[in-house]
Image (cartoon, rainbow, N blue to C red):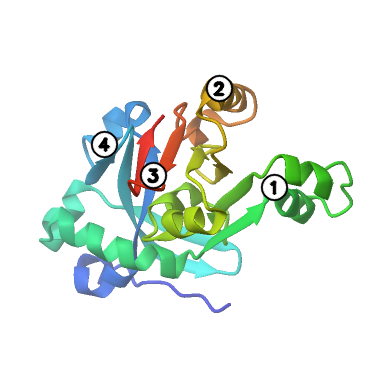
C-alpha cells in the first residue's frame, strides 16, 4: 500500500483533514486528566475521543490525537467532528467479525484445541477492525450491532476484551451476567496491559429496544 499521509501544514486546516478524522473508545474514569484537554463525547462509562490519520502504510498506521487547541484552531464544533468521524472510521478501519474458532485459528493455524463442537456450545464472536488496533470503536459503527443481533436472532452480551477488540455473545440467559463479569475482571487483571483496558463493565444490546446499556 502506498503511503497516504497528510502534510503537517495541511493539518492546520480542517477541510484538509476532515476525511481523516476518526474516533476511538477509552475508559472515562481511567482517562479523567486527559479528557480535560481533548474533545470527547460520553458513551456509558466510556468516552468517544478523536484522532486524525497522519499516515497509513502497510501494517503501520499513525494518528494524532485531537486536542481542544485543535478545535479552536480549526473553528469546528464537537458535533461536526463526531459526524465526520462517524462517517470516516468505518471506511478507514472496516470492521471484522469472526467466530472465536476462526479468530483462534487465524492467530494459531496449527491449533486443534478449539473444535467446531466447542464453538457450537460457546457461540462467541470477536469484533475488531481489519488492523486489530483500537477495534472496540466498532461498537459504534452505525447499524453494525443491530444487524448482527438480527443475524443471530437474539440480544447480545458485549464483552470489552480490550481497547482493541470486543467479544460478542448471544444472550441465552441473563443469569449468566455475574459469571461473565468475573471473566472480564480476570481478563483485565491477568491478560491486558493497563493502558489497553477498556472497561470492567459488561454491556448488553437489547434487540427489542435497539440500544446498548451496562448490564
Within-10-Å neighbours for mark 1: few <14, some 14–19, many 20+? many
> Left or right of 169: which side holds 53?
left
User: Based on the displayed image, in which of its 4 quarters is residue 190 positioned?
Assistant: top right
Which label's residue is closer to the chain start, 4 or 2?
Answer: 4
* Image height of 182 relative to 93, above or below: above
- Name the element at disc 2: helix
Q: Position of residue 135 (x, y in %)?
A: 50, 51
Helix, strand or loop status at disc 1: helix
Query: In the image, is 58 to the left or to the right of 140?
Result: right
Q: Percent from the top left, x then y, of residue 85?
A: 31, 61
Sequence-first disc among 2 and 1: 1
- Which is in the foreground here, disc 4 or disc 1? 1
In primary-sequence order, the first of circles 4 and 1 is: 4
Residue that label 2 marks? 185
Q: Quadrant of the N terminus?
A: bottom right
Who's the residue at 17% across and 50% down the image? 69
Q: Tell me, yes or no, if residue 20 can be seen here.
A: yes
Q: Which residue is mark 1?
A: 100
Q: CA distance from mark 4 to mark 2?
A: 24 Å
Amino acid at each position: 500500500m502506498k503511503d497516504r499521509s497528510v502534510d503537517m501544514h495541511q493539518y492546520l486546516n480542517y477541510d484538509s483533514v476532515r476525511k481523516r478524522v476518526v474516533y476511538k473508545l477509552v475508559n472515562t474514569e481511567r482517562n479523567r486528566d486527559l479528557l480535560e484537554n481533548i474533545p470527547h463525547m460520553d458513551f456509558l462509562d466510556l468516552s468517544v475521543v478523536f484522532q486524525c490519520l497522519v499516515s497509513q502504510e502497510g501494517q503501520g498506521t499513525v494518528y494524532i490525537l485531537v486536542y481542544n487547541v485543535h478545535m479552536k484552531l480549526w473553528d469546528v464544533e464537537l458535533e461536526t467532528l463526531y459526524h465526520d468521524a462517524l462517517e470516516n472510521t468505518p471506511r478507514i478501519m472496516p470492521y471484522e467479525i469472526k467466530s472465536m474458532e476462526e479468530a483462534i485459528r487465524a492467530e494459531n493455524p496449527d491449533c486443534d484445541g478449539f473444535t467446531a463442537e466447542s464453538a457450537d456450545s460457546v457461540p462467541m464472536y470477536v469484533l475488531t477492525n481489519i488492523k486489530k488496533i483500537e477495534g472496540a470503536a466498532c461498537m459504534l459503527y452505525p447499524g453494525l450491532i443491530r444487524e448482527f443481533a438480527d443475524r443471530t436472532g437474539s440480544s447480545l452480551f458485549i464483552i470489552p476484551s480490550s481497547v482493541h477488540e470486543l467479544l460478542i455473545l448471544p444472550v441465552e440467559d441473563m443469569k449468566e451476567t455475574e459469571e461473565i463479569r468475573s471473566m472480564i475482571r480476570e481478563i483485565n487483571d491477568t491478560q491486558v496491559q493497563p493502558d489497553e483496558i477498556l472497561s470492567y463493565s459488561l454491556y448488553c444490546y437489547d434487540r427489542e429496544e435497539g440500544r446498548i446499556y451496562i448490564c
